[in-house]
Image (cartoon, rainbow, N blue to C red):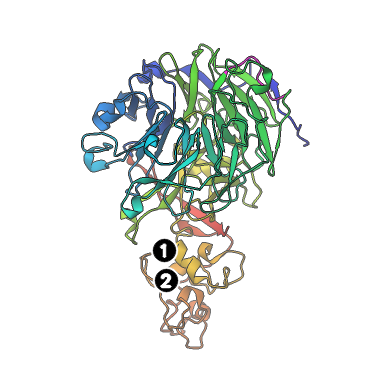
Amino acid sequence: MVRPSVLLLLLCPTADAALVDEVADSLDLARGDPHDGGALWVDLNQDGYPDLFTNGTTQGSHLMVSDGGAPPFFYNETLDLAPGLSRAWLHRSTLQADLNHDGWVDLIRHGSTDLEIYLGRGSASGFRLGTLAGQANMLIDIETFAGVTTFELGGIALLDFDRDGDLDIVAQNEGGVLVFENRYSSGQQFGLAEGVFPNVPLRGDYVAVADYDVDGDVDLMVRTYDDFDLFRNDGPGVFAHDTSFNAQATPDWGEGSVNFCDLDDDGDFDVVWTGPMDMWPDDEHLTRVYFNEGGTWETDPAATLWPGLDIWGTACADLDHDGDLDVVFASHTGESFVMVNQGDRTFEQNALVGSSSHASSVAIGDYDLDGDLDAHLSVEDGPNEVWRNDAMDDGARGHLYVRPRTELSETCVPVAERIWRDDVGSTVMLRSLDQTRISGVREQNGGTGRGNQGFYLVHFGNPTVSGDPLLVEVRFQRFEGLIGQVEITPSDLPMPRIVEVTDVDIDGDNILTHDELDDSKVLDDFDGDGISNWSDIDSDGDGISDAVEAGDDDPCTTPVDTDGDGDPDYLDLDSDNDGIPDGEVATTPGIDDAGGGAAGSGLTGGAGLSCTCQSSRLPGGWLAVLLLAVLIRRR
């Protein structure tokens, strides 16, 4: 099918919007103070249920904790968990991540000149955050940095700019992009890293991060004044202006947002860019979509405007579970609305009837874990709103949640004691078993919209994949772009259908991924079967599984090298050097062989790799232990 080259907007109130009911009051989420900035969904107490972290203008931030009910009810636990958050006026962006690698969620928020970090203190403290007094562990005041002469923070986001494994903070400041380097691994906190971004004035507003060209490095988009807005990540600590993108020379559009979303499902990230009518009333500076076509950006100003609409916040999500991303718009001069993606670069409008006329940002998440994504709207002059999605109400539409995870433990410890965090910046897509791509690209987001952060569970809502096996492909961010594929059948998973994909032992053979990469030396595919060694349950093709030839079931021990020739048994066809191939021993009755595994104990390798992968935390303490087939290839 030939797609049109421009975006066509059909203003049609009958489109399948999915967001049908405003339910904030019934959930006790209708905070009464103005909400001008960001919000996000986060599992604060690691019970499996999404909680809400939202910024208010006059009463500070709020931590609204779910009781896990059906539907859930939310309790304001701010004064108990982190009373310092009740301080007002740090009301712009909100972020969450494990910054200091202790396994607990940390929170970040900022205002015009200050940025606060609250470190989670874990289960022993009742999941409180901050100091013992509940105040911020670190307050960053940009006015105290030598060399920073202009002070107006627009937006912040998370990425690992130097590829050291820690999440750093990038901030849009009118004097240029600032990078606050994460130094917790060296016993410090955050410090200003200089010379990372080109030294250009960046008067503007909010930011978004994503690996827009899907090369394994997270890039940055900044809403700027009369300059190029896209900064391409060219490797550790190196960012360059990408002159392929310039939002029509972008005069300062004032309040607004920017998002990376794969709207045309072609495997790379497009851009949604908003502009307020009250700041720039002429039609040249209103909301547009820029389609990424291999590094060039397609848009037709006449066809991609929303004339007469004053848009502040946006978010992308597959609300109607048809496989492509829709766009939620927070309107500041009328009802907010959804542009429902028709799959061919055309969109149909559906209003959120009765929504506030002063919405400022959108946070997407599944507050009731029913499989479809709901929307939280921050409202500038009144209570915030939560719009419930009914896409799963008929029980006929499928979905899948993917949670990429990275292992943080400094030393090898038993699986039950390992520390994990979300692999922020990683990308995810779905493929059929023959490797045909069947979805667009999604990400575990580090900052987007107007001070928001994407849902920590990566959502796919395509009903065509629910009943058949498929491959979940993750490009891990912390593992420097390593690509892993996990075979699952979504309909076999218990609700809410969450699969965690981890980077530590991809093929489940109890040999750590980094050990298999090191052992591979020259031959990444020792037996030539088309499966990389770190993905192959029988890497040397001798009929004895790697798990057996490793010597024990402890992934923290070095794989056995029986004959001491420098090649571990799982990559040695005659592991005891007795002249009898291990494979012959494994398949021939009566042969007595001292090494290479017991006769008949081997497993047969093949195109599918059988392994028990990491478990996913589900509501009520369930553990979904998934039997997965895993394939992986190097970047």
Q: Identify the main secondary structure in magenta.
A: loop
Label for residue 550? 2
Q: Residues within 10 Å of mark 1 (few under 14, many from 20)?
A: many
Measured as percent of width and height from the top left, residue 467 is found at 57, 41
Q: Amino acid at mark 2?
A: Ala
Note whether 300 is above or below 310 in the view shown: below
Question: The residue tagged with tag 1: helix, strand or loop?
Answer: loop
Label for residue 510? 1
Note whether 40 is above or below 583 in the view shown: above
Measured as percent of width and height from the top left, residue 603 is found at 49, 68
Name the N-terminal-most of marks 1 and 2: 1
Residue 261 falls left or right of residue 9: left
- The foreground one among 439 and 161 is 161
Q: Amino acid at mark 1?
A: Asn
Q: Assess whether residue 307 is covered by the magenta stretch.
A: yes
Q: Assess whether residue 53 is covered by the magenta stretch.
A: no
User: Disc 1, disc 2: CB below 8 Å?
Assistant: yes
Q: CA distance from mark 1 to mark 2?
A: 8 Å
Residue 53 falls left or right of residue 589: left
Q: Which residues are magenta?
A: 303-310
Quarter of the picture holding the N terminus: top right
The residue drawn where x is 51% and y is 41% is 491
Quarter of the picture holding the C terminus: bottom right
